[in-house]
Amino acid sequence: MATGVLAAAGASPDAAAITAADVLYAEASGVASHGLLRLPYLADQVKSGKIRAGRPTVVQESAAVLRIDGACGFGYVAARLGVDAVIDGLARGPVVVAAVSNSHHLGMAGRHAERIAEAGFLGLVCSSTSGAIAPLGGHRALLGNSPLALAVPVASGGADGGRSGTRRGRTRTHCGRGSTW
């Protein structure tokens, strides 16, 4: 169903499948803010052209540094390419850094960190975000709630969070349900 919603909006079959898998993973993990709640928003972003049908590519590669152009497409797809490239690179050397640019929301950062940990590597997944938080004494949202997720190859998983007390998506989830917390 999730893949169909995104494909009907104009996403490519591959992008729809990768994005839907990550959205469903978030939902199944209890992170509703990054789960099915996002489908209508993502579909609208595709229809409006804010998310395009571009295919991410590795545009610069050295032994330890990768630069990925997200081609204005789904961040889920660009992040998948980045994580795959990092895991491949770590099989050949001790440190690999990937930077993704020109893409949309990457979804639950912890999902990408878990893939790194499952491959047996230590890693950090982070992202920038638009302004969502007013600084102390401020009246306008200027700071982003940029996520950080740590990949630790242990049986109990890793850590996933942002730099504020709650995620913006979590606030939307509760507001959409009429909750006042």
Image (tube, rainbow, N blue to C red):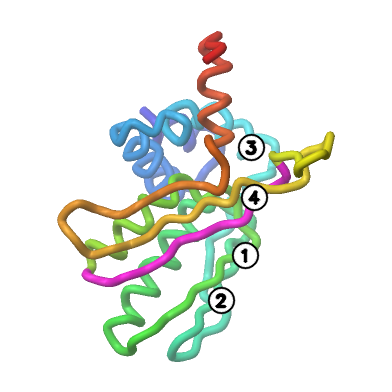
- Gap between marks 2 and 3 measured at Cα: 24 Å
Residue under label 1 = 101
Q: Counting other residues with Cα less than 10 Å from the Cα at mark 4, is it few (<14), some (14-19), or many (20 or more)?
A: few
> Nearer the N terminus, badge 4 or badge 1?
1
Quarter residue 70 falls in: bottom right
Q: Which residue was labeled with disc 3?
A: 45
User: Which mark, residue 129?
Assistant: 4
C-alpha distance separating marks 4 and 1:
12 Å
- Label 2–label 4 contact, CB within 8 A: no
Mark 2 vs 3, N-terminal side: 3
Q: Which residue is mark 2?
A: 67
What secondary structure is found at the residue carrying circle 1? strand
Q: Percent position (x, y) of residue 68? A: 55, 71
Residue 173 located within the stretch drawn in magenta? no
How far apart are labels 1 and 2 at the CA level?
8 Å
56 or 102: nearer the eye?
A: 102
Q: Sequence-wise, which precedes: disc 1 or disc 2? A: 2
- In the image, what residue type sits under mark 2? Arg
Is residue 6 positioned above or below 152 on the image?
above
